[in-house]
Amino acid sequence: MTYAGSTVMVTLLVEFTKDLKLFSRISPQILSYLWAVLVLLVASHFTVGLSPETAVSAFFNAILVSLATNGCCQALETVKEKCKK
């Protein structure tokens, strides 16, 4: 899975789950990191296989995906605000 695909997937997961009662106490930034780790671990498992090296790299790559997701979420909020006016 590419970084762009991971970012889109994590953005959708965050947008659909951030208002759920289970996740409402977690900030969206932390939630995006947790989803990014999960998405990257699952993608690694199904593509190249999950090894200790790919698992560790997923945690570091999740930082990049999470930062990109947070930017996408902020852009969506801006668009929502502009559409309300």
Image: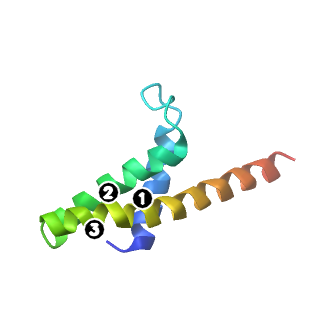
Q: Which image quadrant for residue 72?
A: bottom right
In this rendering, is residue 32 above or below 62?
A: above
Amino acid found under the numbered disc labelled 3: Ser
Q: Nearer the viewer, mark 3 or mark 2?
A: 3
**Residue 57 tag number:** 3
Q: Residue at x 45, y 32 (%)?
A: 23
Q: Nearer the viewer, mark 1 or mark 3?
A: 3
Q: Residue at x 66, y 54 (%)?
A: 74
Precedes in sequence: disc 1 or disc 3 = 1
Q: Which residue is mark 2?
A: 39
Q: Residue at x 45, y 72 (%)?
A: 4
Q: Position of residue 57 (x, y in %)?
A: 28, 68
In this rendering, is residue 13 above or below 52?
A: above
Amino acid found under the numbered disc labelled 1: Met
Secondary structure beneath dot 1 equals helix
Does residue 62 show up? yes
